[in-house]
Amino acid sequence: MEIGIVGLPNVGKSTIFNALTSGGAAASNYPFTTIEPNVGIVAVPDTRLTRLAKIFKPQKTIPAFCQFVDIAGLVKGAASGEGLGNKFLANIREVDAILHMVRLFQDDDVVHTLGSVDPNRDVEVIETELMLADLESLTKQFDKVSGKARAGDKESKEAVELLEKLKNCLEEGRPARALNLAPEVLRPFSLLTAKPILYVGNTDESPDAMVAANFQLFAQERGSESVVICGKLESEIAELTGEDRNLFMADLGMEQSGLERVIIAAYKTLGLCSYFTGGPKEVRAWTIPIGVKAPQAAGVIHSDFEKGFIKADIYSFPELDQHATEQALREKGLIRSEGKEYVMQDGDVCHFKFNV
């Protein structure tokens, strides 16, 4: 699953991407510093995994991962090909969710392509470009199926009805996700504005509390998660390791870095959760969509696990955290045997039984 980082030029996308991935994407005070998208795979912070490793004492510990793509800054008119618009919009179309980076900081030394800092306006500029691109795409798709619909083709008629509904929504200035249609209904249309979105505000080391609060309210009104971070500070934290990092964060009164909050929020935005497997060889977090059933969760490990699924012995992380050993859980009857219809819960610890 990929999350595309988008926003206007000079809002701090590459700075945040570099801190997230400890990568080397160019970060400078010029539009289009990022031309080709940079891709980075990032471990999902999870204190439960650390605790499981202490209990099982495995040879190795493997976290869940998210993949981030740093996409070059969009500009007003991107849907009409301004800047490198068409190329960038195609890159966005390939990701599963959007992280929309928004500038909250004032800095005369960093050029704002629209002349001033206005978070709400900046969000609307990007979203307008995405909606215009979607409208163009829907118009082309409508032209392809409308003839068949007029000829009486039932499937084409249904497609035309849905296309008209989507077009009306976009023409009203609302993204496709506002219709709250099932993902499988929207997926064939490859719409940019159907993708889930996470808003991240990039502020400075002395943030304006009112600006930050208004930004988060703005995101909430759109039904989306939001995180406010200081990109410069996060870059400094990302360069530190071990005790130096812990001391630096403690001095700032931070229990969790802003980037960790971004990763966790991105994971949530994608509709994902984690289950765990544990033993002396390996403790591992596995990524699954929220609401998936046990056989499909087992299939994430290996397709044979899903094909030959028999049952799963499952207990919750809080139970193991409290009682410290699987033996204690067995004695208390806390290890459950679940079948094919069991819906996985975030934090389940599993031992799958299968036969192929």
Image: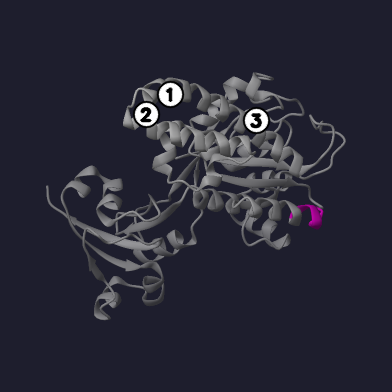
Residue 210 percent across, percent down from the top left: 80, 56
Relative depth, front residue between 218 and 253: 218
- The three-letter code of the residue at mark 2 reads Ser
Q: Quadrant of the N terminus?
A: top left
Residues marked 1 and 2 touching at CB (< 8 Å): yes
Q: Label 1, label 2: how many angstroms apart (C-alpha)?
A: 7 Å
Given residues 176 and 36, the one toward you in this image is 176
Residue 129 is marked as: 3
Report the side of 162 relative to 7 (left or right). left
Horizontally, is 323 left or right of 27 in the view? left
Say how many tags the image has: 3
Residues in magenta, as a range: 207-212
The image quadrant that residue 291 belongs to is bottom left
Question: What number is the disc on residue 156?
Answer: 2
Circles 2 and 3: CB atoms closer than 8 Å? no
Q: Give the x, y percent position of residue 59.
A: 34, 53
Residue type highlighted by circle 3: Glu
Report the residue at 44% width, 38% height from top.
186
- Which one is earlier in the sequence, the residue at label 1 or at label 3? 3
The relative height of residue 354 versus residue 108 in the rendered view (above or below) is below
- Residue 37 seen anywhere in this rendered image of the structure: no
